[in-house]
Amino acid sequence: MAIAKAERLMNLALCLLGTGRPLSKRELRGSIEAYLEANSDDSFNRMFERDKDDLRELGLVIATVENLDGEIGYLARRDSNRLPPVTLDAEEAAALGLAAKVWQQARLAGAASGALQKLRAAGLPEDVDPYEAHSALEPRIPVHEASFEPLMLACRDRRAVVFDYRKATAARPAQRHVEPWALECWRGHWYLAGWDRDRGAERVFRLSRITGKVRSRAGRFTADVPDVVTVRETVASWAGETADRTARIRLRSGSGYPLRAKASAVRDLGDGWDELEIPYGHGLDAWLVEFGPDVVVLEPAELRAEVVDRLRAVAKG
Amino acid sequence: MATNAIDQTRRMLSLVTYLRERPGARVEDVARAFGITEDELISDLDILPLCGTSFRGGDLLDIDTDGDRIWWRNPGALSAEAAAPLRLAADEATALLVAARAVSTLPGLRESDRLALLRATAKLEAAAGEAAGASARLSVTFESEGGVFADVDRAISERRRLWIRYYSPARDEVTEREIDPIRLVSVGHTYVEAWCRRSEARRTFRLDRVAEIRILDEPSAPPEIELRDLSEGLVQPAAEDPEVVIEVGPGGRWVAEYYPHDSAEELADGGLRITLRTPDPSSLRRLALRLGRDGRIVSPLGLAESARQAAGEALAAYDGHG
């Protein structure tokens, strides 16, 4: 039976951590059963390179050293691999325990529990009963988009990416070349901010509109990444939340609670209707139409015309 | 495969450090400390005796369990230095720091919890060193209504019933109800899962739709119910729910982003044919009205007709003035 990959990785890690001097590939191959069983030099070399990469992903710092005979040796030096002392009290530990559970994305969920396990091994106090003493809150960070992981790695490693992107109202996707800066989750949706190479400008992309695969370029991009990226402002303006106008509408009494919550003034007209003033940016017409015959737009005239237009389209069927 | 090799290796490296300090540790306690099942731990304990610093030298880790306690019979096989706690990887620091920062921004989080989280975050940043840098590339903001949140949180910890006025967009109405809160869940928006005394059923309420809230003196007594796994989303239509078919043009593609659906077929004009299920199709009248010329309800016919009728009635108010 083939030897489990976890067993092979673990043996390589322990060999590299346990040695005081660099070990050559030959020595490692002679020490680890899975490598001994490799049926060719080629397959051993491929396996060894991949395993080193995997261990580096886990945070292991593996030094490559050339000895006097020109032979390459490997070791994981203690000082570069040891966790600095970190002392957390029971409250802090419980808080981190809650935070470690929020990811719903496999890679980050695995990484978060891995971090907590490393801290646990270093003496992090164990939860007494997290539900008694703390908020009854279960925050979850949803990640449904397949493009999340490649973009996260591209942001981390500063690699430019190429993907097909369909704008909200476009019929066909178009290819975009982007230097990715940061990912932000807002209102349960993920957005990417970055430099759009074709447009020569900063752009925000919604991950759910990326179609197909994200491909990343081999080299690192060298342009600066801004410290502060304003994803939220951009998205809020898409959503029409930057109000610069006021609408006056009639609303049937008792209906349209969210419109009332947003209104700057509400007046009872006494005939089963109220009059509301609502500050808005754009997109209000689509929202008002949802309330059907319970809303009548008074002004401005453009808004009134847009609503009538939408209603006619629905009435025609 | 239950665990991937990377996560398992990461875990086993920490286990080695942990077990070396705790001879005779209980399987149950170790599994809890590591946030894994006992079966997962046992599968790690099956692999560890096959690992060591040198296969040929015979110094494999002699780690053994009787199913209750774990014994390491040759702790000298690994030097104290080799078994020292390992530094955090960039992804590990990112995952934990981004989550901790996100949780600490939740309005309504108890102040003592927030302060503990901020202290922990600062210590973690220091311990992670360079590995913490990449965490600046990810951020998450939860939305929740601070005052409502604090009341729900308090009601849960004091086990008291709540009275709420709640807005239901499907019916465009605000109803009063008494609920026994069970837990708060944040998935983009923040929700309270509760036993609703009006419908005598489990219900999920979005906090930003709570128009008014009061903590009652009555104790909260939700029946014992199994908590659902919400990772697939809060809206989980049942197989027996009626089917709704909607065709949208390019301007209505957003429907597929907002409504959980069974299928979304591409149409020749760049639009989509979306099939979804909902216990109450009439609740989609709003959507039909909103879509305007960007889409239409294909079925059920009753729903399409009620949208047409509502639009017709609404237009009547503009007649002669428009």
Image (cartoon, rainbow, N blue to C red):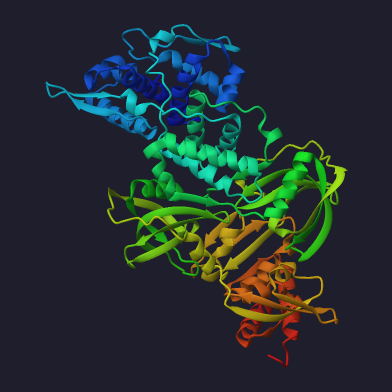
Q: List x then y, in percent, for residue A98.
A: 59, 37
Q: Is A124 on the left or on the right of A23, as rendered?
A: right
- In the image, residue B241 above or below residue A77: below
Q: B31 or A26, which is in the foreground?
A: B31
Q: Quadrant of residue A63?
A: top left
| Picture quarter with the C terminus of chain B | bottom right
Point out the residue furthest to the left here.
A69
Residue plotted at (50% across, 36% down): A112
Q: List x then y, in percent, for residue B144.
A: 65, 54
Point out the residue furthest to the bottom here.
B320
Q: Is any atom of residue B132 visible in this view?
A: yes
Residue plotted at (60% across, 20% down): B29
Q: Is B304 on the left or on the right of B249, as rendered?
A: right
- In the image, residue B157 above or below residue B214: above
Task: Give the total of numbered labels.
Answer: 0
Q: B134 or B5, which is in the foreground?
A: B134
Residue plotted at (32% across, 67% down): A200
Q: B119 or B177, which is in the foreground?
A: B119
Residue plotted at (41% across, 28% down): A83
